[in-house]
Image: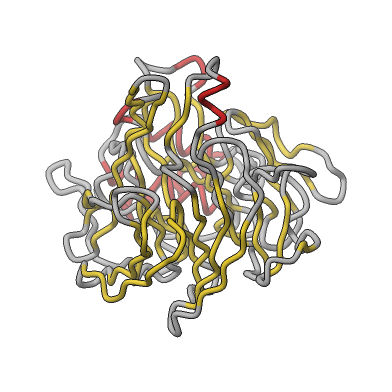
């Protein structure tokens, strides 16, 4: 039975169950019926879960002898590409106009005397090969549209930042830097870069009890704002932060930059693009997660990295019961991309997976398999608008 026929038959079956309108648990029933069937059933169930929320989103997942290979190199906006059996994913994962454009694996702790370094491997989505490919880069971020990426060489801090053409896989331009770069991120419009600089490798740390060594650790020194087309660079120093990686990030509207670990003051310190202290931008003032406020401003997602919740901005009340896992990004006004914990059903060290859900968490579409708690089986996605 093909996915379209299954979808029609299931909807007809449910419509005959009762003359009343479909209840709020439509998505839950769809997912419970799915069980461990083939990909065609998964496709229909995921589509029904989203239809229950009033948004029709097609789901693309091929079933060629059990292989989940994308049928197209660049799926159209609005598709949901789910890889429930892949963690880390091998093929493109996407929901709405957001996609996992890259990810890093590992986090292996390599100890050397009083120091330890976290070692990572970066994977980028290759549209030509239709899968994620391992790279040799030390840090990666992908521009909106998924046509190019900003990369730093393996040994950090790096003396330059590269602009990588994702169609050819080649660096088309190197931008030299006077201060060593440890992290790079694109502005929301894909025209500028924020490059965080460090006095040494930002992924090196000391043993917690070794306070003397901790004082000698490399730290953050400042950041660049770079106009990619012109190559114009503006550098601003920053006060030293806590040890380890503390990259600056862009505001949603691209007008300001956030310091996630200021030496003094609130949880976040904001600066304008000239490096002057600035007020908190609109839609950024509530919540402590990457997701923040929904696009329409009705909800905000918050969490501590282990547990999260969605609140109504007007009433400040929690929507639903909260959830285990971190909120990552809003794909629309009422669809949230986040991690979902396995609760009491964890197997081995597999403990959470990427899902698409409504604010209350009642309608959930799994997007990947379960990731591991540590080692190479753990992975961190780069979420990019496509």
Asked whether, in this view, residue 120 is left or right of residue 221, the answer is left
Q: Nearer the viewer, residue 129 or 322?
A: 129
Please state the horizontal and vertical placement of residue 245, each as a whole percent of the image. Answer: 51, 42
Q: In this view of the protein, which residue sits in the foreground, 169 or 117?
A: 117
Q: Quadrant of residue 171?
A: bottom left
Chosen colour scheme: secondary structure
- Residue at the bottom extreme, as displayed: 230
User: Does residue 330 sit above or below 89 in this rendering?
Assistant: below
**Apparent side of residue 278 relative to residue 123 in the rendered image (left or right):** right
Residues 119 and 301: in front is 119
Residue at 77% x, 37% y: name it. Answer: 318
Q: Quadrant of residue 348?
A: top left
Tell me where residue 229 appears, x and y as whole percent: 43, 83
The percent position of residue 320, horizontal first and vertical second, equals 70, 35
Q: Is residue 111 visible?
A: yes
Q: Residue at x 49, y 65 (%)?
A: 186
Q: Residue furthest left?
A: 65
Q: State the image coordinates of residue 25 (x, y, percent, origin top left).
A: 60, 37
Question: In the rendered image, which quarter contains the C terminus?
Answer: bottom left
Which residue is drawn at the image coordinates 38% and 23% (left, top)? 350
Residue 80 visible from this viewpoint: no
Quarter of the rendering containing residue 79: bottom left
Q: How many marks?
A: 0
Q: Which is nearer the eye, 3 or 353?
A: 353
Residue 341, placed above or below residue 314: above
């Amino acid at each position: 039975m093909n996915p379209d026929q299954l979808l029609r038959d299931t909807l007809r079956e449910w419509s005959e169950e009762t003359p009343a309108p479909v209840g709020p648990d439509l998505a839950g029933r769809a997912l419970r019926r799915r069980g461990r069937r083939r990909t065609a059933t998964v496709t229909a169930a995921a589509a029904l879960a989203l239809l229950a929320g009033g948004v029709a989103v097609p789901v693309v997942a091929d079933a060629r002898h059990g292989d989940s290979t994308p049928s197209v190199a660049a799926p159209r906006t609005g598709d949901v590409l789910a890889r429930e059996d892949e963690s880390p994913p091998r093929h493109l994962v996407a929901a709405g106009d957001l996609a996992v454009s890259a990810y890093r694996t590992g986090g292996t702790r390599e100890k050397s005397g009083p120091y330890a370094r976290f070692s990572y491997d970066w994977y980028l989505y290759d549209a030509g090969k239709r899968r994620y490919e391992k790279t040799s880069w030390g840090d990666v971020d992908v521009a909106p549209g998924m046509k190019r990426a900003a990369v730093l060489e393996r040994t950090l801090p790096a003396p330059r930042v590269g602009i990588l053409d994702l169609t050819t896989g080649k660096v088309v331009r190197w931008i030299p830097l006077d201060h060593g770069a440890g992290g790079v991120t694109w502005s929301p419009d894909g025209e500028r870069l924020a490059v965080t600089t460090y006095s040494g490798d930002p992924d090196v740390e000391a043993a917690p009890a070794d306070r003397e060594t901790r004082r000698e650790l490399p730290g953050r020194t400042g950041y660049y704002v770079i106009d990619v087309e012109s190559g114009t660079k503006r550098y601003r120093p920053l006060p030293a932060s806590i040890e380890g990686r503390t990259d600056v990030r862009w505001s949603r509207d691209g007008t300001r930059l956030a310091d996630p670990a200021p030496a003094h003051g609130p949880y976040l310190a904001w600066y304008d693009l000239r490096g002057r202290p600035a007020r908190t931008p609109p839609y950024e003032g509530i919540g402590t997660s990457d997701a923040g406020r929904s696009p329409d401003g009705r909800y905000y997602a918050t969490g501590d990295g282990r547990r999260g919740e969605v609140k109504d901005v007007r009433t400040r009340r929690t929507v639903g019961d909260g959830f285990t896992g971190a909120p990552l990004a809003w794909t629309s006004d009422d669809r949230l991309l986040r991690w979902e914990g396995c609760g009491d059903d964890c197997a081995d060290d597999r403990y959470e997976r990427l899902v698409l859900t409504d604010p209350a968490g009642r309608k959930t579409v799994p997007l990947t398999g379960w990731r591991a708690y540590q080692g190479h089986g753990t992975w961190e996605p780069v979420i990019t608008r496509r």
